[in-house]
Image (cartoon, rainbow, N blue to C red):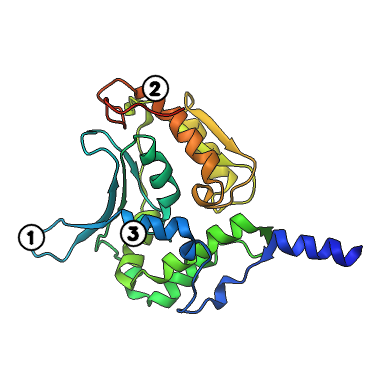
Amino acid sequence: CLLDDLSDLCDKVFFQDYHTVSMDFESDLSQSTEYKSFRSTVPLKQVVVDNDGLKVWKLYDAGPRGVRCPLICLPPVSGTADCFYKQILPLTARGYRIISIFNYTDSAPVFWMLPATLLKKMIIGRFPRKLMDSQIADSIDFMVERLESLNQSELASRLTLNCSPAYIQPQKVQVEVTILDVFDESALSQTVKEEVYKCYPSARLAHLKTGGNFPFLARADEVNIYIQVHLRAYEGTDKSATDSGTPVER
């Protein structure tokens, strides 16, 4: 019975050591039918944002083109635009337009001196190394794979933006705000979370019992429900993320 219990446990939890990931690593999510369907149906677009053609934004734009106020998804430091494929596929099928953007900037005054390998270790070092359920483990595997695709300039610019002091004056945010948070361990400290709550005291709180650092992958169904609930407040207005002629499924 003990062996059976251990076997069941091994089917549900994993221990990950992301410091030993090779360049040939392929995650289960990137090999999934859902991800392959996304890559085959939603084209990756490139937009040049300067005159010399060196700065390029990569993005996925899916859903009704008539929507003028789409849902914008910005990936974390370790991710690329395709990390939101679990939102893009189901939500566009319900009539929403979604744009997922991976942008590049060369403003990296400190990190540009460090090699890409060291920059990747700085990011991977924030990932948990302990027992976790399979969906959270798969989400980290996928993001580590995305991280391996970033070059030194992209990593340096992202880390610079992530570490630069910045402050949004919440009183100037004149839209509904929903804060999605998880109760289990993540890279964000409790202090940072509490500061966000203080900045947006009127925000709706969407809590997930678990989800790790990437709940949009590990708990995609729950995240998508919260997104739809948030966007319903704008249906029928000029801020709607759906085409006015496309009914949204409930």
Please tell me how crowded label 1 is: few (under 14), some (14-19), or many (20+) other residues with Cα within 10 Å.
Answer: few
- The secondary element bearing badge 3 is classed as helix
Is 10 positioned to the left or the right of 150 in the image? right
Of mark 3 and mark 2, the one earlier in the sequence is 3
Please tell me how crowded label 3 is: few (under 14), some (14-19), or many (20+) other residues with Cα within 10 Å.
Answer: few
The amino acid pointed to by label 2 is: Ala
Report the Cα–Cα distance between label 3 and label 1: 31 Å
User: Residue most toward the left?
Assistant: 51
Residue 145 disc label:
none
Residue 51 disc label:
1
Is 33 positioned to the left or the right of 18 in the image? left
Quadrant of the drawing holding the N terminus? bottom right
The residue located at (24%, 63%) in the rendering is: 106
- The secondary element bearing badge 2 is classed as helix
In this rendering, which labeled residue sits more in front, label 2 or label 1? 2
Is 120 positioned to the left or the right of 47 in the image? right
The residue located at (31%, 53%) in the rendering is: 42
**Residue designated by label 2:** 233
Q: What is the tally of numbered marks visible in this picture?
A: 3
**Residue designated by label 3:** 40
Toward the viewer: 118 or 3? Answer: 3
The amino acid pointed to by label 1 is: Asn
The amino acid pointed to by label 3 is: Ser
Of mark 3 and mark 1, the one earlier in the sequence is 3
Toward the viewer: 111 or 173? Answer: 173
